Image (spheres, rainbow, N blue to C red):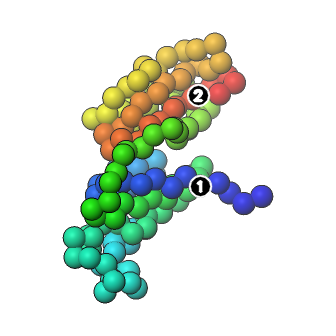
Amino acid sequence: MAPLNPYLIFDGNCADAMRFYEKTLGGKLDLMTHAASPIADQVPPEAANRIMHARLVFDGGTLMASDAMAGQSYDGMKGFSLSLHFPTAAEGQKMFDALAEGGTATMPFQKTFWADGFGMLTDRFGTPWMVNSGQNA
């Protein structure tokens, strides 16, 4: 079966978000702006520095993203969460805290009936996350 990779759309802050995820999740990040792409001459000047495609390959998966085109309406990220799973509550808590920095915890990281640790947050870039750890996570 082919892997399923989330693809996030940002509104001009894709590069900052993906660099944050690279620092937080580890791995190797590749970024391409519209200006650096083979179709640079077909892109409006206001879109030149927006990210055309980003890919972060890290232990556990691949996260891809881009910026919406300049001038297009952007409603934010809705209707999903990225979910991370860790063997221990200590590992989960550490990741939860890192992702929550500058964001909003919607459910504090805590013990639940299904996991030694679980929490939900929206990071400072608007990406929703769920962090699970231990037990049946």
Looking at the image, which residue sits at the far right? 1
* Residue 98 image position (x, y, % from top left): 37, 36
Amino acid type assigned to the residue bearing label 2 in the image? Ser
* Residue where numbered disc 2 is placed: 133
Identify which residue is drawn at 48% across, 63% down: 55
Amino acid type assigned to the residue bearing label 1 in the image? Asn
Q: In which quarter of the image is residue 107?
A: top left
- Specify few, some or many for label 1: CA neighbours under 10 Å numbering under 14, 14-19, or 20 or more: few
Q: Which mark is residue 33?
A: none
Instruction: Tell me the quadrant of the picture where the N terminus can be found.
Output: bottom right
Instruction: Tell me the quadrant of the picture where the C terminus can be found.
Output: top right
Identify which residue is drawn at 46% across, 47% down: 25
What is the number of callouts on the image?
A: 2
Identify which residue is drawn at 55% across, 15% down: 111
- Residue 98 lies left or right of residue 5; in this view the side is left
Query: What SS does tag 2 mark?
Result: strand
* Residue where numbered disc 1 is placed: 5
Identify which residue is drawn at 44% across, 58% down: 65
- Residue 47 lies left or right of residue 100; in this view the side is left
Query: What SS does tag 1 mark?
Result: loop
- Residue 69 lies left or right of residue 132; in this view the side is left
Would residue 77 be visible to someone looking at this image?
yes
Residue situated in front as seen by the camera: 104 or 28: 104
Would residue 28 be visible to someone looking at this image?
no
